Amino acid sequence: MYNIDEVRKQFPMLNNKKMQGKPLVFLDNASTTFKPQRVIDKMNYYYTEINSNSHRGDYDLCYLVDNEVSKARELVANFVNADVNEVVFTAGDTEALNLIAYGYCLDNLKKDDVILLSLSEHASNVLPWYRICELTGAKVEFIELENGRVTVKTVRKAFEKQRNVKLVALAAVGNVLGYAIDVKGITKVVHEHNAIMVVDGAQSVPHQVTDFKDLDCDFLTFSGHKMCAPNGVGVLVGKKELLDKMSTFHLGGGMNVKFFPSGEYIPSEAPIKFEAGTLNIPAIMGLGEAVKFLHELGMENIHKHDEELFDYAIKELENCDDIVIYNKDSRNGIISFNRKGVFAQDEATLLNSKGIAVRSGQHCAKMIDEVIGAPATVRLSTYLYTTKEEIDAFVNEIKNGGDILDAYFFN
């Protein structure tokens, strides 16, 4: 296990930062994560030492940048056990999912084909599929949840009910309830029915070992900013044979071999054909550095740390009679709860006045209310630098309670 005190020293945001005049307790890591100094330094290295474009010049600076982008792609590929030519850089998880929707589905889905989702999905893994249905005549159907979870059993049941299922898109770990699905087992069922499996890894890749080849899913997506990397960069991992057949909705410089007055063009091979225009080079370099950082800490250690903090926080919260917890057994660093009779945003605002940052609302999963029976929740989410003492500070404020008006009249 890593030394958490030494790890925290590497994060400028954790060094004596205060919120509302109190020490910052950041418990909104499912939304975004802090960046270690080495990631910031890597981005600054680009801006101060090698600022140039990638694959656009024949001078030394471009050569150095080309090498950095290639190294970052190799680091990411190794991190999730994929081939280098299966890693596409995107602007984030959302763009990656849209790229699959427009690049694969528009060419392969037709009227009355079915896309299977769950009610617990994030907007990024719902709305692109809705649009594809508008454009193709396909339809979205929902997999039944078993105690808030998608299971192999419920996926099999969905296939029994629905004909013409062509694609299944599910989060490996939900962003509200934090439940992990059996990606490998579900993928096996999906492939038995000759359908495509898309895995939204936004909440899983930053927290646990991810093996793309072993999972055998067809596509995997994730964002950099949820794993200590910069904002504005993400990854689409796809099986090479599928990437080769896909179209791209981004066209421009760098992604083609040649184009002609006739209107025809020859695209480059994957993954380059999906990376039109100027790449977010400093963010890509930062992502590569973040992946190195996580690898050094060990993904098994990070996941174990999340589990230990989850168990500790749940044990403490269960002693609070007026707290309703919606996912007592998820163990993935996310706890969703409400205080009886208190609106979620009011609870989060009160905690903010105590220097504690949590998320409240529907968390972009706007069908989750049908699953948990509540219009909104307060969400606590930990990461590799979260301490037991921060959980204690949070629990202490939960136990103390307070008047919401206090949040607006603090000193």
Image: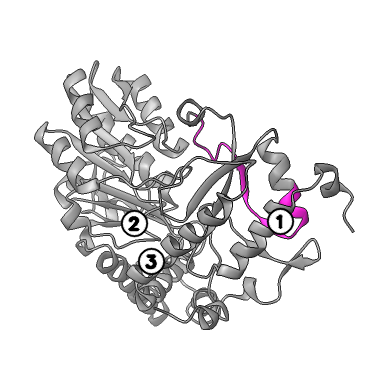
Badge number at residue 80: none
CA gap, disc 3 to disc 2?
A: 42 Å
User: On the rendered structure, is 31 left or right of 105?
Assistant: right
- What residue is pinned by disc 3? 304
Whether residue 1 is visible, yes or no, is yes
Up the image or down, 186 lies above or below 289; here it is above
- What residue is pinned by disc 1? 397
Secondary element at image label 3 = helix
Q: Nearer the viewer, residue 232 or 222?
A: 222
Residue 269 forms part of the magenta stretch: no
Image quarter of residue 61: bottom left
**Neighbourhood count class around disc 1 (C-alpha, 10 Å): few under 14, some 14–19, many 20 upward:** some
Secondary element at image label 1 = helix
The amino acid on which the numbered mark 2 sits, given as a three-letter code, is Gly
Q: Position of residue 281 (x, y in %)?
A: 44, 66
User: On the rendered structure, is 170 left or right of 183?
Assistant: right
Q: Are marks 2 and 1 in contact (CB under 8 Å)?
A: no
**Neighbourhood count class around disc 3 (C-alpha, 10 Å): few under 14, some 14–19, many 20 upward:** some
Up the image or down, 227 lies above or below 249; here it is below
User: Which of the marked residues, 3 or 1, is nearer the chain's N terminus?
Assistant: 3
The amino acid on which the numbered mark 1 sits, given as a three-letter code, is Glu
**Neighbourhood count class around disc 2 (C-alpha, 10 Å): few under 14, some 14–19, many 20 upward:** many
Residue drawn at x 37%, y 71% is: 301
Q: Position of residue 340 (x, y in %)?
A: 66, 35
Up the image or down, 369 lies above or below 313; here it is above
Instruction: Please name which of the two marks, 3 or 2, marks the residue nearer to the observer.
Output: 3
State which region is magenta.
Answer: 350-366
Count of marks, rendered view: 3
Residue drawn at x 32%, y 26% is: 144
Badge number at residue 254: 2
